[in-house]
Image (tube, rainbow, N blue to C red):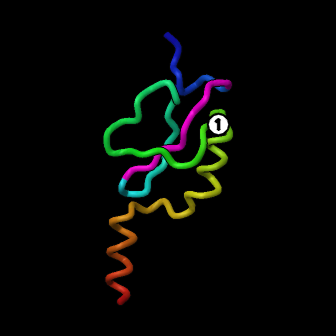
Amino acid sequence: MANPFDEESAQFLVVVNDEGQHSIWPTFREIPRGWRASGKPGTRQECLDWIEIHWTDLRPQSLIDADARAKS
């Protein structure tokens, strides 16, 4: 069986976890616990492009929050 993440023409979702980390997930699979869909379905490349544009701070949300508290 081929890896569904390598299928360029398959439909994917951008998924995000509570730490704000992004990934892609095939639309035919159930989204894993701890992740939620973000945005609309698209091709693998469309989803990767969306992530590149929208996920600009790669730090986990807990670190972002801790940095903000330290600066207050």
Please report the residue visible at 48 percent of the width from the left and 49 percent of the height from the top: 22
User: Quick one: which residue is furthest to the bottom in this view?
Assistant: 72
Q: Is residue 11 magenta?
A: yes
User: Quick one: which residue is furthest to the top in this view?
Assistant: 1
Q: Is residue 23 magenta?
A: no
Name the one closer to the observer, 30 or 46.
Answer: 30
Name the one closer to the observer, 54 or 6.
Answer: 54
Judge whether 44 appears above or below 34 on screen: above
Name the amino acid type tagged 1.
Gly
Give the dominant element type of the magenta stretch: helix, strand or loop: strand
Say what secondary structure mark 1 lies in.
strand
**Residue 51 in the image: x percent, y percent?**
59, 50
Tell me where the magenta segment starts and ends, as one range. 9-17
**Residue 63 in the image: x percent, y percent?**
35, 68
Q: Quadrant of residue 68?
A: bottom left
**Residue 5 in the image: x percent, y percent?**
54, 27
Please report the residue visible at 38 percent of the width from the left and 64 percent of the height from the top: 61
Judge whether 26 appears above or below 57 on screen: above
How packed mark 1 is, by other alpha carbons closer than 10 Å (few <14, some 14-19, many 20 or more), is some
Judge whether 53 appears above or below 8 on screen: below
User: Quick one: which residue is furthest to the front in this view?
Assistant: 40
Q: How many marks?
A: 1
Quick one: quadrant of the C terminus? bottom left
**Residue 59 in the image: x percent, y percent?**
43, 62
Q: Which residue is mark 1?
A: 42
Please report the residue visible at 63 percent of the width from the left and 34 percent of the height from the top: 44
Judge whether 64 appears above or below 24 on screen: below
Please report the residue visible at 43 percent of the width from the left and 57 percent of the height from the top: 20
